[in-house]
C-alpha cells in the first residue's frame, strides 16, 4: 500500500508490519494525518525499499527473540543511522526489552496493540526530535 500526503519529504514513513490488518490500519491512520506511507510486510522488503528510496522515519514490527527480525534494525544502524527507527514491540516494555531495543538503535518504542494517539506521538517525536536529512 502506498499513499501520498501533503507533507514535505521528511514526512515519508516506511512502515514494516507482517500482519496485513495491522499494516493497513496503521498506514491508513498515518495517511489520514498527511504522511506519505509505504507499507511492506517483511524486513527484506524494507531493506530493498530503503536501498532505493529515502524516508524520514521507519516504523517496524519487532520480536526481540527472533534473529530474523533483527536484520532491519542492524542494517539500518549501519547504513542509515540518521533515520529514526520506531520499534513496535509485542512484548511488555521491561527494562531488559527496552535496553535491548535501544542497543538495536530503536529511538522510540510502541507496545502493541497501540492506538492512533500513541502512533502519532511517536512519529511526531521522531520527526521533531531527530534530524531529518531527507
Image: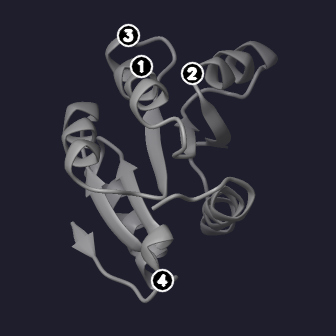
Which percent across, then down, holds residue 58?
46, 49
Nearer the observer, 133 or 112? 133
Q: Quadrant of the C terminus?
A: bottom left
Q: CA distance from mark 2 to mark 4?
A: 28 Å
x then y, percent, for residue 48: 19, 40
Which residue is disc 2 drawn over? 104
Q: How is the image coloured?
A: one colour
Which numbered disc covers residue 70? Answer: 1
- Residue bearing mark 3: 67
Determine the CA span between mark 1 and mark 4: 30 Å
Image disc number at residue 54: none
Instruction: Write the residue at 44% across / 41% down.
Output: 60
State the separation of the CA atoms marked 2 and 3: 12 Å
Q: Is residue 109 left or right of residue 51?
A: right
Please, what secondary structure does the residue beneath circle 3 have? Answer: loop
Image x and y of residue 92, in percent: 69, 28
Mark 1 and 2 residues: CB-CB less than 8 Å, in contact? yes
Q: Locate residue 106: give its quadrant.
A: top right
Amino acid at each position: 500500500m502506498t499513499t501520498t500526503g501533503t507533507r514535505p519529504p521528511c514526512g515519508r514513513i516506511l512502515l514494516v508490519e507482517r500482519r496485513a490488518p495491522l499494516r493497513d490500519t496503521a498506514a491508513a491512520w498515518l495517511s489520514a494525518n498527511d504522511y506519505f506511507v509505504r507499507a511492506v510486510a517483511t524486513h527484506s522488503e524494507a531493506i530493498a525499499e530503503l536501498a532505493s528510496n529515502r524516508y524520514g522515519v521507519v516504523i517496524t514490527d519487532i520480536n526481540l527473540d527472533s534473529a530474523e527480525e533483527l536484520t532491519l534494525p542492524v542494517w539500518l544502524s549501519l547504513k542509515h543511522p540518521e533515520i529514526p527507527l520506531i520499534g513496535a514491540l509485542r512484548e511488555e516494555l521491561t527494562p531488559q526489552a527496552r535496553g535491548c531495543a535501544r542497543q538495536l538503535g530503536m529511538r522510540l518504542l510502541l507496545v502493541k496493540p497501540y492506538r492512533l494517539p500513541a502512533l502519532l506521538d511517536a512519529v511526531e517525536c521522531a520527526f521533531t526530535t531527530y534530524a531529518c536529512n531527507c
